[in-house]
Image (cartoon, grey):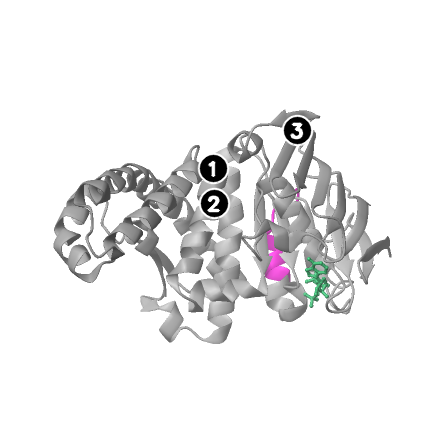
Amino acid sequence: MLRTLRAVDFRCFSGLSLEIPAAGAVFTGDNAQGKTSILEAVCVLVRLHSPRTRRMPALTRIGGAAGFGIAGEAWDMERRVRWQGGLELAVDTEPRDGPGAYLADGGLIVWMGNEDLDLVRGPAEGRRRYLDFIGSQIEPGYRTALARYRRALKAKNLLLKDPRPREEEIRSYEEVMIAEGSMLVHARARIVELLTPRAAFAQRSVSGRDEILTLEYRAAGGMDLRAAMEQARERERRQRQSFVGPHRDDLLLSINGLAAAEFASEGQQRTLALALKLAQGEALAAARGSLPVYLIDDVFGELDPGRRNAVLHALPAAAQKWITTTHLSWLDDSQGLGGMARFVVRSGVAEPA
Ligand SMILES: Nc1ncnc2c1ncn2[C@@H]1O[C@H](COP(=O)(O)OP(=O)(O)OP(=O)(O)O)[C@@H](O)[C@H]1O
């Protein structure tokens, strides 16, 4: 958990300095005041990842300096992230050489937001990102394997588009894709195994009904990537595209045996999105033996009281929660929010409520 968070020239904040109790904090304010950006700063500090963008420059305050800084005491370590055209990382004042070294002893994060509905309704890419965010937190080497796989895939696709493709070079990138991709698919299969019973349980408890949720990992090339790539070779050369590999994987979600994207009601889909994130938290805790911090962006104000209380109940009582909301009406009659600090966020300034 975090005790402090400081930021300079991050999104709409020229400066931000917060002390957060173990239970967490609730941030209230109108739209577009900076609430989500505070949660985003935590996610970048702890995981070097923003759920809103993959471009670090977008996080730098427009009209501010040429970069941003975030720092804070997280899991008893003083962590620092600076972006000035490149990343500068430090833990307890010692520079860390690259994201891998910085993240090796970083904490765990679950992000919950209304856009999680896309996990159910949207394209497979969102579900792959969901698995990747979990993988990078619990599987050593996952993040590196993903980066290497992506680079090799990009190079292979470029070569395939060449009017005179150089087969030998393509094969050498395929070897990288097979090595790194095999690591990814086996890790994803383990992650889905960890998630499945936890998500099924969460679906039942949040819906309050006997809904049977199943998760099925669909590895686009099966578990034997080398064989799949050999089989797809001719078609890939003809159509000049890569058809097999973890960049085409999906996670199939069904309720009572029917595909959730097509057949589930809106309420069931929303519950399913919450169940996936609750399961993520449980899976992270089971794999790493410590609780994640929950960053909960604008979710509770949108839920009916029954589901809101079910979600609050399903969150581990001892976990730190950072919650944003535009309206307070639901807050005071909600169980489970004792001990949390309250802040009001207005035009890029957060003040105790
Ligand atoms: N790089 C940036 N520099 C300056 N301002 C930015 C930058 N990126 C986003 N903003 C602005 O920051 C403001 C706060 O955005 P944020 O999403 O944090 O608000 P919010 O309070 O969570 O709003 P909502 O309740 O609508 O989700 C927005 O007005 C946005 O345009």
In this view, 222 is above or below 308: above
Q: CA distance from mark 1 to mark 3?
A: 20 Å
User: On the rendered image, what quadrant is the C terminus found in?
Assistant: bottom right
Count neighbours of disc 3 (C-alpha within 10 A) and say few if under 14, some if 14 to 19, many if 20 or more. Answer: many
What residue lies at 53% left-to-right and 30% top-to-bottom? 104
The amino acid at mark 1 is Ile
- N-terminal-most mark, 1 or 3: 3
Q: Is residue 285 magenta?
A: no
Q: Looking at numbered disc 2 in the image, what kind of residue is underneath it?
A: Ile
**Which element carries disc 3, helix, strand or loop?**
strand
Asked if residue 149 lies left or right of residue 307, the reply is left
**Which residue position is annotated with label 2?**
134
- Is residue 249 at least partly visible in the picture? no
Residue at label 3?
91
Amino acid bearing label 3: Val
Density class for disc 2 (Cα within 10 Å; few <14, some 14-19, many ≥20) is many
Determine whether 262 is above or below 227 in the image.
below
> Does the stretch in magenta take in 317?
yes
- Where does the magenta region start and end? 309-318
Could you give the CA–CA distance between mark 3 and mark 2, rounded to whole angstroms? 22 Å
Left or right of 203: which side holds 313? right
Rendered residue at 36%/40% (across/down): 187
Labelled pair 1, 2 in contact (Cβ < 8 Å) = yes
Question: Circle 1 sits in a helix, a strand or a loop, which is it?
Answer: helix
Q: Secondary structure at mark 2?
A: helix
Q: How far from the left and from the top, in percent, is residue 238?
A: 16, 60
Q: How many marks?
A: 3
| Contact, mark 1 vs mark 3 (Cβ under 8 Å) | no
What residue did someone put label 1 on?
138
